[in-house]
Image (spheres, rainbow, N blue to C red):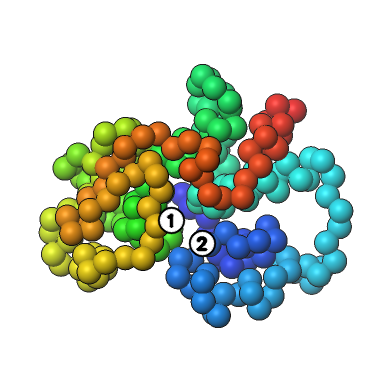
Amino acid sequence: MARNLEPSCRQCRREGLKLYLKGDRCYSDKCSFNRRPVAPGQHGTSRRKLSEYGIQLREKQKVRRIYGILEKQFKNYFEMADKMKGITGENLLQLLERRLDNVVYRLGFASSRAQARQLVRHGHITVNGRKVNIPSYITNVGEVIGVRERSASEVEHFKALKEGTGRTVVPWLSVDYEKLEGTITALPSREDIDIEIQEHLIVELYSR
């Protein structure tokens, strides 16, 4: 599985804002972005004014890094979104939100999307009772996302989840932490996506 190996904190600094790529660490005093909120490299403190293209590119890169997607796959999502009915930018965000690794994160089963992707790849996650180890699997309304019975009883991470969690679950999902199961009750709307994204800039970039 191809993945971005660039250090997470460096990615946040490059985009100039917290992307919350490292889960709980991003909320603590150990967060590198809090200590040094400038772009990496010797010229990081002297940011140049971006061109229109530069602004659009940075927005695309930010969204790619938030969801942990490489360039070719992101372009494929955009092409899928462009063929769907409705607004292309909103369709794109909806597809990204429906990825299995993102749903696992949104349900609170993982503290970051990277951890959620790892849980999926290691075979801990099920969809409608069947193991699915593909992080990019696009979920649908009515599907039940759960944790394999063996994983729930043997993995300490999941044992701790049963005792409760403080994570707020998005409106289009419902979750039962005792059973370690979540259900997709609706498709995510633009209002449900709490990330600071200007998706129209991405559409403009690919429309060049």
Residue 185, above or below 87: below
Give how far across and how far down residue 173 sits, in percent: 34, 44
Q: Which residue is mark 2?
A: 21
Cα–Cα gap, marks 2 and 1: 7 Å
Name the residue: 62% across, 46% down.
197
Name the residue: 65% across, 61% down.
17
Q: Which mark is residue 113?
A: 1
Give how far across and how far down residue 122 sits, in percent: 28, 56
Give how far across and how far down residue 135 sits, in percent: 37, 46
In front of the other: 200 or 172: 172
Relative horizontal placement of residue 48, taking residue 96 as reference (left or right): right
Q: Are marks 2 and 1 in contact (CB under 8 Å)?
A: yes
Relative horizontal placement of residue 97, taking residue 173 as reference (left or right): right
| Residue at disc 2, secondary structure | loop
Mark 1 burial class by Cα count in 10 Å: few <14, some 14-19, many 20+: many
Q: Which mark is residue 43?
A: none
Name the residue: 38% across, 41% down.
172
Q: Quadrant of residue 78?
A: top right
The numbered mark, 2 or 1, whose residue comes first in the sequence reads: 2
In front of the other: 179 or 77: 179
In front of the other: 143 or 49: 143
Name the amino acid type tagged 1. Answer: Arg
Give how far across and how far down residue 73 sits, in percent: 51, 38
Name the residue: 69% across, 75% down.
36
Name the amino acid type tagged 2. Answer: Leu
Residue 21, above or below 79: below
